[in-house]
Image: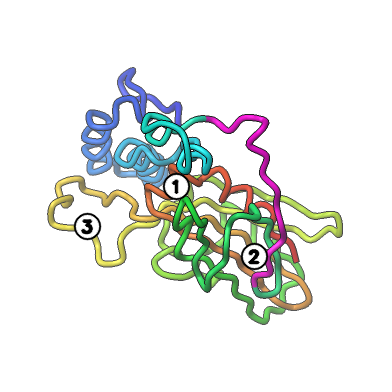
Amino acid sequence: VNTLELDGRSAGPESPKPVCALTATRFALARHAAMRRQLYRVLFVACTSALTPQPAISRRALVGGTGAAILLPRVARAEDEVTFARQKYGRGTVELPKTWQVDGSSIREPVLGVISSSVRSTSAKTDRRSIEDLGPIDKVALSALNLGGNRAKGDVVAAKRRADASGTVFYEWDLAVPPEGGCPRSEQDLIVCPPVEVALIAAAVADGELVVWECGVDQRQWKSFGRQLRATRSSFQL
């Protein structure tokens, strides 16, 4: 998605405005559903510049050093060692950096602030024996997962199948979630609404239950913590 080009121009964050306008126009003219889905993904990148998470500002940069060190994000170095701990969510667990604190449906960091304010895990009885019984990952109806908010209407930006050591299969999705009430009036000329949330989903079936872990973040949180949250989602175990 990051390397798609339209008329020779990158659809990444280097040229968001021209590609955003061009893609919106093409979206309006596209007749085929497959083409519309592809253009929506390009629009997601072009209008939000949020698909590729940026390196987070380190805690060390925030609590010490010069003003320039506070303002400029940098890639973590070897000495910025991070340790992890498993946190229980419903029937499953995920691995979080030890400095991250779970507070209800939120994850916070004492210095960096709110990582996500919309994290939860749900489970529901099912007669299926594996998540694969719902179909191939690209064919699963998101409405079957009982997701929060407007996530079931989200556009699938990325999807992945994995299996743990016991053979339990997990499906993972990155979703670009549209606003629940439709586009604000100021954005209606874009034809399609820019996403208001990136949702990270993991789901599996075990012991007669469909178990889902989900996390939603806004654009700022995604840019700062997207990589860590993806790793957290992929650490989900039952």
First-in-chain label (3 vs 1): 3
| Image quarter hosting the C terminus | bottom right
- Label 1 packing within 10 angstroms: few (<14), some (14-19), many (20+): many
Q: Which residue is mark 2?
A: 134
Q: Residue at x 78, y 76 (%)?
A: 207
**Left or right: 166, with 177 as reference point:** right
Name the residue beneath numbered marker 3: 183
Residue drawn where x is 45% and y is 64% of the image: 117
Q: Amino acid at mark 3?
A: Cys
- In the rendered image, residue 149, in percent from the top left (x then y), is placed at 41, 69
The residue under the point 41% across, 62% down is: 153
Q: CA distance from mark 2 to mark 3?
A: 32 Å
The residue sitting at the top extreme is 8
**Front in this rendered view, residue 7 or 74:** 74
- Whether 154 is drawn above or below 118: the answer is above
Residue 33, x across and y down, in percent: 38, 48
Q: Amino acid at mark 1?
A: Trp
Q: CA distance from mark 3 to mark 1?
A: 21 Å
Q: Is residue 158 left or right of residue 113?
A: right
Judge the density around disc 2: few (<14), some (14-19), many (≥20) Cα neighbours within 10 Å.
some
Q: Is residue 10 above or below residue 137?
A: above
Instruction: Report helix, strand or loop for mark 3.
Output: loop
Query: Mark 3 Cα within 10 Å, few/some/many (few <14, many 20+)?
Result: some
Q: Which residue lies under the disc numbered 1?
A: 222
Extreme residue in the right direction: 166
